[in-house]
Image: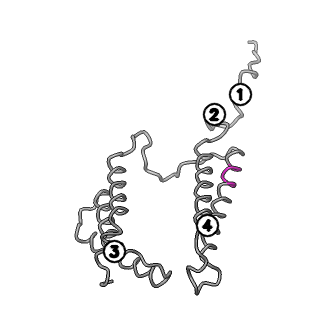
Amino acid sequence: MSHVDDSHLDDHDGSDAPTRPVPAHDWSQLGLAAGLVVVAVVILVDAAGLRQDFAQIDPIGPRVFPQIVAVGLIVLAVLLTIATFRGSVPEGAEGEDVDLSNPPDWKTLGALFCAFLFLVATVDVLGWTISSALFFTATTYVLGSRSWVRNLLIGTALGLFTFYAFYSGLGVMLPAGILDGIL
């Protein structure tokens, strides 16, 4: 029996793992890195417009924290870009139960987006506490909870907590809306 040398036909490296083609660059990762840079630039431009006399008791001024966040975003964007050009490809989590063959649930996403638009449109009129309580209730309903009263109470508690946390902790007054003079 003669042996035919077919080793030139075998591209297999000896491992049993299936090989898949690796793209030259993962454009979604590069897009994310570009998005991080855009957000960082917006934060830097916005921070540059902050008045220094905004907080008289703060020795470092109001610009420092946004600048730290923006620099952090730029560093993350650079690291992500380097990792992408080196061929790093993200892998899905082992325990993830998302079926990627199903299309996105546009109805749920649309309802959540509408709830957010409601929050933005009503926060000045109704105030932070009421708008955020209604926003919390609407989002929990869209995501499957049917306990209206409990969700409204939790949303109200969260709204009041964040209202006073911003006022007491940061010195920032969120809109009180129709509760002006009560809160």
Q: Quadrant of residue 143?
A: bottom left
On the image, numbered disc 1 is attached to which residue? 11
Tell me what residue is drawn at x 68 percent, y 49 percent: 81
Q: In front of the other: label 3 or label 1? A: 3
Question: The residue tagged with tag 1: helix, strand or loop?
Answer: loop
Label 4 element class? helix
Mark 2 or mark 1: name the one nearer the start of the chain: 1
| Colouring mode (rainbow / by chain / secondary structure / one colour) | one colour
Q: Amino acid at mark 4?
A: Val
Rounded to the nearest angstrom, the CA distance separating label 3 from label 4 is 27 Å
Whole-number angstrom distance, CA of label 2 to CA of label 1: 13 Å
Structural distance between the alpha carbons of marks 4 and 1 = 47 Å
Residue 80 lies in the magenta stretch: yes
Q: Residues within 10 Å of mark 4 (few under 14, many from 20)?
A: some
Q: Earlier in the sequence, mark 4 or mark 2?
A: 2
Q: Which callout, 2 or 3, points at the residue further toward the start of the chain?
A: 2
Q: Position of residue 179 (x, y in %)?
A: 29, 79
Q: Is residue 118 left or right of residue 31?
A: left
- Please identify the dominant SS of the magenta region: helix
Please tell me the numbered disc located at residue 69: 4
Percent coordinates x, y for residue 109 in the rendering? 37, 50
> Which dot marks residue 21?
2
Crowd band around label 2 with a 10 angstrom C-alpha radius: few (<14), some (14–19), many (20+): few
Left or right, residue 174 beside residue 86: left
Number of the front mark, 2 or 1: 2
Residue type at mark 3: give it.
Thr
Look at 65% across and 37% down and name the residue there. 22
The magenta segment is 78-83
Point out residue 59 in the picture as x, y percentages from the top left corner. 64, 84
Sequence-earlier tag: 3 or 1: 1
CA distance separating discs 4 and 2: 37 Å
Residue topped by disc 3: 129
